Image: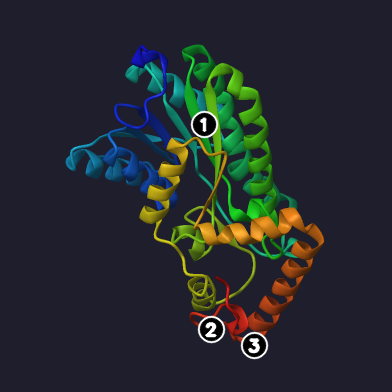
Amino acid sequence: MDSNKTIRAYKDGVAVVTGGASGIGRAIGEELVKRGCQVVIADLQGDLAEEVASKLCLSGGKATAVKVDVANYPAMEQLIRETVGGLGRLDYMFNNAGIGIGGHVNHFDVEDWKYIVSVNLMGVINGVQAVYKVMIAQGFGHIVNTASVAGLMPSPGMAAYSTTKHAVVGLSESLRAEAARFGIRVSVLCPGVIRTPILEGGGKFGRMLVDIPSETISRMWESLNPMPPAQFAEKALDALARNKAVIVVPSWWKRFWWINRLAPSLGLALAQKRFEADLRAFNAGEIKEGGGVSGRDQR
């Protein structure tokens, strides 16, 4: 079969990674290059994206950098048009850019909602819209959207983030069923807790709406054993090569997903219990190393 008419699994392929300058996006870009893929590092942090691409090239890989705002559809459309025009194809589109806004729903105003939706949901939609018809025309491609385990289960305390991630899961699963007839794959990444800047107050462009000491937040996330992003990227790309639809890494987070699927009422009750315990722990400052909030086992 003509290699120009089918997806390249990873060697000699072309990939765009949004949010590629840090965290999961950077790790995915680095792992793609290791596997022989040519990568476009797309990020609002243009200078950092250039730095990442330069390091990848110095290591013997092929990478370029583009400054882009995923919330800007014309900019995303231009990114895809220039990538395909310059490199002749696009095998993988990683719609990965995202932010966090820390706070409960009563801490939000409508502008906070608009902001997180513009990046976490519309950013993915813009990537899909920009690339889908291009992939239909070329007859192949793999769209990979980054959601979260927060998109698979109730996540009190982070309702806005969870809202956007549930939407990304729904978009990805629905599009996967539609796109198969065109030879296009669609997968959704649902990371558990990964050691990325989003754990440090929502990431570079995120924000905190509540006054919680940074060391308290750090202890909370550390209690959940964050996975190194490089390890996440390796496992995620292995699963993508097998064309998995929903990819949950680390795998032990699947238990919460399964509980919510098999017994939604139980999943909701457990989520509420966990949230109430977290509130008590925050108020008492009792988040403990290695044991989760209030010392309970989170693994």
**Whole-percent x, y for residue 101 in the image:** 61, 58
Badge 2 marks a residue whose secondary structure is loop
Quadrant of res 293: bottom right
Q: Relative to residue 245, is residue 101 depicted above or below?
A: below
Crowding around mark 2 (Cα neighbors within 10 Å: few <14, some 14 to 19, many 20+) is some
**Whole-percent x, y for residue 269 in the image:** 79, 68
Please tell me the numbered disc located at residue 143: 1
Q: Which of the two discs, 1 and 3, labels the residue nearer the N terminus?
A: 1
Please tell me the numbered disc located at residue 284: 3
Report the residue at 65% width, 61% height from top.
Answer: 256
Instruction: Report the mark closest to the observer, 2 or 3.
Output: 2
* Of residues 228 and 279, the one drawn nearer to the viewer in this rendering: 228
Q: CA distance from mark 2 to mark 1?
A: 39 Å
**Whole-percent x, y for residue 201 in the image:** 53, 64
Badge 3 marks a residue whose secondary structure is helix
Q: CA distance from mark 2 to mark 3?
A: 11 Å
Report the residue at 34% width, 47% height from top.
Answer: 48
Outermost residue on the right side: it is 265
Three-letter code for the amino acid on which mark 1 is drawn: Ile
* Of residues 6 and 163, the one drawn nearer to the viewer in this rendering: 6
Please tell me the numbered disc located at residue 288: 2
